[in-house]
Amino acid sequence: MISIQNLHAEINGKAILKGIDLEVKAGEVHAIMGPNGSGKSTLASVLAGREDYDITKGSVTYLEKDLLEMSTEDRAREGIFLAFQYPVEIPGVSNVNFLKTAINEIREHKGMEALSAKDFLAMVREKSKLVELDAKLANRAVNHGFSGGEKKRNEIFQMAMLTPSLSILDETDSGLDIDALRVVANGVNKLKSENNAFIVVTHYQRLLDYIVPDFVHVLYNGKIVKSGTKELALELEEKGYDWIKAEQGESITA
Amino acid sequence: MAYQGDEILDEITNQDYKYGFVTDIESDKAPKGLNEDIIRLISAKKNEPEWLLEWRLKAFKLWQGMEEPSWAHVNYPKVDFQSIHYYAAPKPKKQLNSLDEVDPELLKTFEKLGISLEEQKRLTGVAVDIVLDSVSVKTTFKEKLAELGIIFCSFSEAVQEHPELVKKYIGSVVPQSDNFYAALNSAVFTDGSFCYIPKGTRCPMELSTYFRINEANTGQFERTLVIADKGSYVSYLEGCTAPMRDENQLHAAVVELVALEDAEIKYSTVQNWYPGDKDGKGGIYNFVTKRGICAGDRSKISWTQVETGSAVTWKYPSCILKGDYSVGEFYSVAVTNNHQQADTGTKMIHLGKNTNSTIISKGISAGYSNNSYRGLVKVNKNATNARNFSQCDSLLMTDTCGAHTFPYIEVDNKSARVEHEATTSKIGEDQIFYCNQRGIDTEKAIGLIVNGYCKEVLNKLPMEFAVEAQKLLAISLEGSVG
């Protein structure tokens, strides 16, 4: 689905990503872990198309297209979804109006007719149940006045509505209590299929108890330094990131 | 950077005025300049009674002794009042009964604006009284309104047909001596609209007037008078666009609203006059005096305005809350871009007991424009339990524009409760990126965000106007992205 090769990115002249290689196939869940400042969120942002970053080297192929050539909105229309670490508030714009605009933009891009109001509302009802989102939230302004947990749930709700091919969850677990975490994870698990893929960016192993990854990658200092299966996440939980740091330190000095 | 200030700037400055064109209709013009003879000429052309001529002449004398105000936060070259034609009328002046008789040039003009009469007539019963330059060309739906005793006609017609009402109320809210532009208007106004709703009558349709400045160098001096008798209700819509021009055009209208006991007037404006080009050249000067009086107990006046046009705007729709328990409301969206300047707001004058006023002002500034809110809340010493809530928000689109708030509060009664809230924010790159990431392009995203920001005001507009207003905001700000 997506193939990242030797990706380098910097912001204001400071290198953040220093050669990322990652291959994600349909039906897979990849977890990206790593200590603070390792470049996890940068990777998520670069894939989604945030223009604050300069891509200095490397390539990204998504569904046989050059992702880096595509605008942010076209990436979204082609099925890339980013669940934000800090969902943005848009006062005065209702969630449903926002989503309806988004869905119809995506449909237009695909040459499909706009969704009827009836079908749209039926979809809202169905998908809001998936993340146990209060129907009232769907009618409130986008994330405006939402609690931290409600915002994250709303991200997953939007994901459910937009049915993306590749979903990138950027620290969706941060600031969530255990119940909210379970709800969010259940939502993701129900949306998982053999046709879509997930990249789950997280600092803690906790989320991976609920969303079980096929692969775990450790990002450190802008590079993937270790890859493995879900057991790697458990090992990290146990030993902490110092172990990785030490190993990297050694390999540099060695 | 996802969305740089410069890019936004480019988008906005590259947005040309979409309604710029000049209709070629022959004009019957008075010579340039202003003196007593011109006023006599206007009055004679309009076949006015002696009292009205005297009233005009009195206004002219007052005006001669007045200074052009300079306190507003706007800058523009001085207007040469002697180089303006104070009277211009389209030549074919015969009475018209059907659209077939209307000058086809004029019909084309309205079609370009997307407000063709055919469409208007078919739409859910909107009566349209068009003012082209200074003479009303056509009035529709009049018979239907007449059945209810509602008078909705041009000002000149009202002078002829209902002189007692005109005489009683003209200048009763905005006296000739009120201010420089109001005095000028009182001396030289050529036409406008008149509306009277009889006791206990609810006007069954939105009354609508489209103003349009057409003749080069013709200052337009409209006069509107709306009277809602006891227990009546009316919703009045005013909307306008103007053709592209190099010379500045002066517009100094006067609008007076009178609400008697238990009456309610809802006055909505969507204003899109030519704002000048990217460099600030040309454009309309809009110096308007709008004021309503809640004369009777429990009466209500509500002003809603969406202002996107004009080079310079100087406008403060106000309410005098004289009746006990009367209510005044002001909902405003003012957009400025390029070199536009707007100094707008409201005055709420609380005289009666238990009077209540609400002010919601949303300013949006882009380009190099300056957008000022200026508002006065005055509570008189007898206005026991008066209440006011004011909220003034400013949204900045660039780093080169300005937003200013000048709230004045004068309270002479200790039981009054006056609240004022103000915020200034910049359109967020994060918000735009969030929309982009959901598949919404930047142009649509700005439209969505801005419309959300203005929602409280747009919701107050009648449905068909709300749609038009959203389009206008889109035209003014979304622009030519990419």
Image (spheres, grey):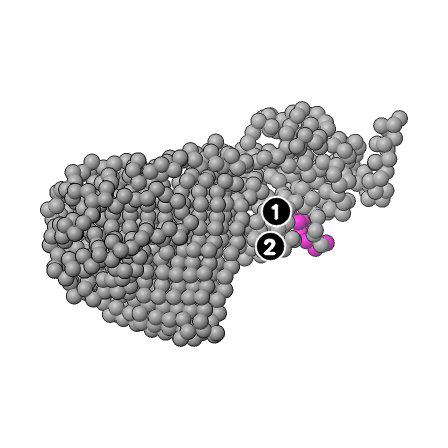
Report the predominant secondary structure element of the magenta stretch.
Answer: helix
Could you tell me residue A180's position as x and y percent?
68, 53
According to the image, label 2 marks what residue?
A146
Res B356 → quadrant: bottom left
Residue B438 seen in this snapshot: no
Residue type indicated by callout 1: Pro
Kindly indicate whether the residue at mark 1 contacts the one at mark 2 (C-beta within 8 angstroms): yes
Quadrant in the picture for the N terminus of chain A: top right
Q: Residue furthest front?
A: B65
Q: Chain of mark 1?
A: A
Q: Is residue B248 above or below residue A122?
A: above
Could you tell me residue B122's position as x and y percent?
25, 49
Horizontally, residue B314 falls left or right of residue A199, namely left
Residue type indicated by callout 2: Phe
Magenta part of the chain: A178-189
Residue drawn 29% across the image and 47% down it: B251
Residue drawn 18% across the image and 46% down it: B87
Along the line of sight, the residue nearer the viewer: B98 or A232: B98
Q: Chain of mark 2?
A: A
Residue drawn 48% across the image and 36% down it: B9
Could you tell me residue B427's position as x and y percent?
52, 44
Horizontally, residue A54 falls left or right of residue B124, namely right
Residue drawn 65% across the image and 53% down it: A149
Along the line of sight, the residue nearer the viewer: B184 or B64: B64
**Residue B151 sits inside the magenta stretch:** no
For marks 2 and 1, the one nearer the N-term is: 1
Could you tell me residue B205's position as x and y percent?
27, 58
Res A61 → quadrant: top right
Q: Which mark is residue A87?
A: 1
Quadrant in the picture for the C terminus of chain A: top right
